[in-house]
Image (tube, rainbow, N blue to C red):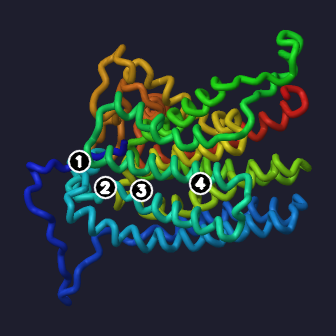
Amino acid sequence: MAARKRASATSEATKPEPTTNALGQTDPPIAPPKSGLILKLSLFFSLPYFYLIFYRYKIESDLKRSILINAGLSLFGFFVTQKMIPVASTYVLRRNLFGFDINKKGTPQGTVKVPESLGIVVAIVFLVLAILFQYFNFTADSNWLVEYNAALASICLMTLLGFVDDVLDVPWRVKLVLPSIAALPLLMAYAGHTTIIIPKPLVPNFGIEVLDLGWIYKLYMGLLAVFCTNSINIHAGLNGLEVGQTVVIAFAILIHNLMQIGASADPDYKQAHAFSIYLVQPLLATSLALFSYNWYPSTVFVGDTYTYFAGMTMAVVGILGHFSETLLIFFAPQVLNFLLSVPQLFGFIKCPRHRLPRFDPETGLLTGTNDGTLVNFFLRLFGKMSEKSLCAKLLIFQAIGCCLCFVLRYFLAGWYK
């Protein structure tokens, strides 16, 4: 859910005609990407990544080669995505798939038609990269091949259902069911363990160290997929927020996986985290390309297609990487946003169509409302601010939450589990 008002078929009977410049050439439908911002973010992300993979840990050459090949494909995917988004924008505008930015209502920017559902480009490039990568890493008898392709099937199905939601605008009660349907290929193909390790302080109470949950574990996996997809979708409403939170969490997952591979001597444990890396690197790269267009002022809207796709992808890497507890801590701001939203989502309090802050066109500042979202909570806590400043603060809060997760794991290691 973005800060947008969708165009209706009745109000837009004709297709928008592209404008032409003085030379008779068709002008691009959207502004160029914010390459300077992406360059700074890439340099920031690269430093810890290369430090861990080349200096801090001694990773086996074959495993390191696969990770770097995947990184190379992901980099290629970044450039492809960045080139394809303007092309796709032209087509969605022709089909009247556009919206107006509600947080700029009353200003000239609020009357601009912003192309919708550009998350479909990210999802397609991601899936192509993930499929091509099998040639470089997997063989026909690989134990991971079945689960890897089941994961891709779930992500692909979630992308399709997200795009259906963008086109049909399905009600919330249906949105809660969609991730459950998309998770079915992964749940049916899952052949991993269904056990959990009992925290050491609780072992005397249970009398065992490992508990087999059986079908309950698969139910938990399905619920995790539902939460991850919808939590990204409802923590939205600002330019760059949906993609920005995905970029922060994906980078945290990448660093976590590298640290676990470097610190472990168990081949199966390493392979599980490598599996996660093979999916999260293309997610991070393609999302950065989309972020270059979606950061304030946004020239494209990502749509529910992207939020569902990103949420399902991160749920998949957490489930098959066997670090779902850590993933939920990475999602701490989304958990807080969900808890704030519960009274409205479950009908205890009236829930408006758009739970967005109020925009003052005179000052260009946002004011928090009483709606139960983290966006409005920040505005009530810190006061009025611009959309760009608010989004930046929320993303910093997301990064702080991820950093606290690493600190928590460090201090609880050896005592909790």
Of the residues tagged 4 and 1, which is closer to the observer?
Answer: 4
**What separation in Å lies between label 4 and label 1 (alpha carbons)?**
35 Å
User: Residue 268: x, y in percent?
Assistant: 82, 48
Of the residues tagged 3 and 4, which is closer to the observer?
Answer: 4
**What residue is drawn where x is 43% and y is 74%?**
83
- Name the residue carrying label 4: 149
Give the amino acid type for the residue marked by disc 4 in the picture. Answer: Asn
User: Residue 85: x, y in percent?
Assistant: 39, 67
- Name the residue carrying label 1: 6
**What residue is drawn where x is 40% and y is 58%?**
120
- Name the residue carrying label 3: 119
Give the amino acid type for the residue marked by disc 1 in the picture. Answer: Arg
> In the rendered structure, are the residues bearing label 1 and label 2 in contact, judged by CB atoms less than 8 Å apart?
yes
Q: Quadrant of the C terminus?
A: top right
Crowd class of label 3 (few under 14; some 14 to 19; many from 20; radius 10 Å): many
> In the rendered structure, are the residues bearing label 2 and label 3 in contact, judged by CB atoms less than 8 Å apart?
no
